[in-house]
C-alpha cells in the first residue's frame, strides 16, 4: 500500500475549499501504487483522486505532468484530468506536500493481460506518442543513462547482498549500454512507466491510462521497450512472443517504427529492464521497514535483462526481419 503521508479530515476539508467540488462525503487511502500517496475522495459533485507527491517527484515537474494529462485528454486520450483550483493554480499543498486533484477514471487494471490487451495497449501507446508531439513543455528523462549510473553508484556496494555476482554483472552491463546506447532515434513525450497497473480496461476495451509521473522526453521506441518488459513476460519468466507481436502490431497500426528503431529494440529492452531493476534494487535496499508499500522484486528485471542480452534481432520479439 502506498500511503506515505497520512492526512487528517480537517486539513483535507480546508484543502478542498480552494476547489469547486462541494462538501467532502468520504475519503480513503488507496492500497496500490509505489511512488506517491493516493486517496479516493467522494465529494458532493464527483469522485476524485487526491495525490500527495512524494520522494521522486520534483515539484518543478508538476506543471509538465499535469499539463501533459490535460493536453492528452484535450486530444481525445482517456487519462485523468487535473482539476484547477479556484485561483487557477493547478495544485495546492496538504500536509507539507504538493497535492493535486485529478478526475477518477473508471475501469480496472488487468492481473493477467492477454495478447488482445497487448494489441490495445500498442494502439494506445502510439496514439499517445502522436498526441504528445505538439505538447509545448519538455522534461528530460531523469532515469536515463546518467540516472542509472547515479542509482548504481548508490547501490553497487550492497548489490551482492541481494544476489552474489550482481555487482560485477551490472557494472559490466552499464558499461556496455553506455558504449552502445543509440543517439539518434525519433523522440517525443513518453509515459515511461506503462505497466499493467497503470492501464485500465472495461471488459476487453482499454478505458484509460494513469500515472504520468515518470513521463518525459526520450526515444519513442524506448517506451515500447518498457511495455515489452512489463507486459510480455509470463509469471514463470518466459517471454511470450505472441503478446509481444500483438503489442508491436498494435503500435505499428498507428505509428510504424522505422528501421533504426527496430534494430535498436533489443538494446532498448536491455536498457529499460536495467532501469526498473535499478529503481527496484534501490528501493529494496533503502525502503524503511514499516513503510506502507509492497517492495517490488529487482531480480524479476534481472531475469528480463538477461533474456534481452540473448536476443540478436527484433525478429525474436515477433517483428518481421528488416
Ligand atoms: N485517475 C484515477 N482514477 C482511478 N483510480 C486511480 C486514478 N489514479 C490513481 N488511481 C488508483 O490509485 C492507484 C495508484 O496510482 P498511481 O498513480 O499508480 O500511484 P503511484 O504514482 O504512487 O504509483 C492506482 O493503481 C489506481 O488504483
Ligand atoms: N512500475 C514500477 C514501479 C512504479 O510503480 P507505479 O505504481 O508508479 O507504476 C516497477 O514495477 O518497478
Image (cartoon, helix red, strand yellow):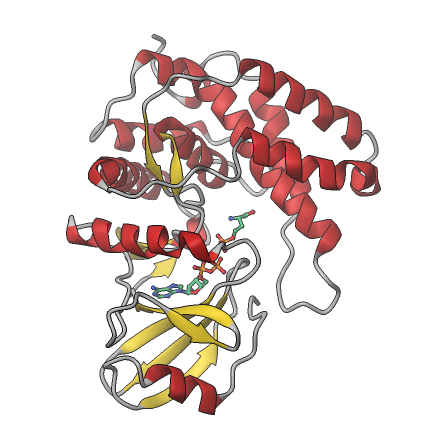
Q: Position of residue 241 (x, y in %)?
A: 44, 27
Seen at 61% across and 37% down, the residue is 301
Q: Nearer the viewer, residue 235 or 253?
A: 253
Work out which quarter of the rendered image holds the C terminus and state it: top left
Q: Position of residue 234 (x, y in %)?
A: 53, 39
Q: Is residue 286 left or right of residue 181?
A: right
Q: Position of residue 182 (x, y in %)?
A: 46, 17
Q: Position of residue 29 (x, y in %)?
A: 49, 76
Q: Is residue 53 left or right of residue 45?
A: right
Q: Nearer the viewer, residue 193 or 240?
A: 193
Seen at 45% across and 40% down, the residue is 231
Depicted 166 relative to depicted 299: above or below: above
Q: Is residue 131 visible?
A: no
Work out which quarter of the rendered image holds the N terminus and state it: bottom right
Depicted 266 relative to depicted 236: above or below: above
- Examine the image and state in which quarter residue 20 appears: bottom left
Q: Is residue 64 left or right of residue 78?
A: right
Q: Is residue 120 visible?
A: yes
What is the number of callouts on the image? 0
State the residue lying farthest toward the left: 75
- Examine the image and state in which quarter residue 192 appears: top left
Seen at 43% across and 84% down, the residue is 12
Q: Nearer the viewer, residue 271 or 250?
A: 271
- Examine the image and state in which quarter residue 177 appears: top right
Seen at 72% across and 25% down, the residue is 171
Amino acid at each position: 500500500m502506498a500511503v506515505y503521508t497520512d492526512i487528517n479530515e480537517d486539513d483535507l476539508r480546508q484543502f478542498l475549499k480552494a476547489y469547486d467540488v462541494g462538501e467532502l462525503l468520504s475519503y480513503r487511502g488507496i492500497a496500490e501504487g509505489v511512488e506517491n500517496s493516493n486517496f479516493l475522495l467522494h465529494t458532493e459533485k464527483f469522485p476524485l483522486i487526491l495525490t500527495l507527491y512524494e520522494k521522486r517527484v520534483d515539484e518543478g515537474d508538476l506543471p509538465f505532468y499535469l499539463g501533459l494529462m490535460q493536453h492528452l485528454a484535450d486530444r481525445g486520450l482517456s487519462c485523468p484530468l487535473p482539476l484547477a483550483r479556484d485561483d487557477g493554480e493547478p495544485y495546492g499543498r496538504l500536509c507539507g506536500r504538493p497535492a493535486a486533484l485529478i478526475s477518477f477514471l473508471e475501469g480496472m487494471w488487468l492481473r493477467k493481460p492477454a495478447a488482445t490487451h497487448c494489441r490495445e495497449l500498442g494502439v494506445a501507446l502510439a496514439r499517445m506518442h502522436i498526441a504528445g508531439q505538439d505538447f509545448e513543455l519538455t522534461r528530460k528523462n531523469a532515469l536515463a543513462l546518467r540516472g542509472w549510473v547515479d542509482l548504481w553508484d548508490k547501490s553497487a556496494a550492497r548489490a551482492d547482498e541481494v544476489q552474489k555476482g550482481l555487482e560485477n554483472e551490472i557494472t559490466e552491463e552499464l558499461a556496455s549500454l553506455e558504449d552502445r546506447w543509440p543517439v539518434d532515434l525519433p523522440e517525443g513525450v513518453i509515459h515511461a512507466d506503462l505497466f499493467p497497473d497503470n492501464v485500465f480496461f472495461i471488459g476487453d476495451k482499454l478505458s484509460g491510462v494513469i500515472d504520468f509521473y515518470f513521463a518525459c522526453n526520450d526515444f519513442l521506441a524506448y517506451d515500447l521497450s518498457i511495455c515489452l518488459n512489463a507486459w510480455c513476460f509470463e509469471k514463470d519468466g518466459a517471454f511470450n512472443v505472441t503478446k509481444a507481436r500483438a503489442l508491436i502490431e498494435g503500435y505499428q497500426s498507428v505509428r510504424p517504427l522505422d528501421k533504426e528503431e527496430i534494430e535498436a529494440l533489443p538494446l532498448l529492452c536491455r536498457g529499460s529492464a536495467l532501469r526498473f531493476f535499478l529503481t527496484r534494487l534501490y528501493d529494496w535496499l533503502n525502503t524503511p521497514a514499516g513503510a506502507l508499500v509492497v517492495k517490488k522484486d529487482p531480480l524479476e528485471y534481472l531475469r528480463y535483462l538477461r533474456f534481452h542480452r540473448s536476443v540478436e534481432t527484433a525478429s525474436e520479439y515477433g517483428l518481421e526481419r528488416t
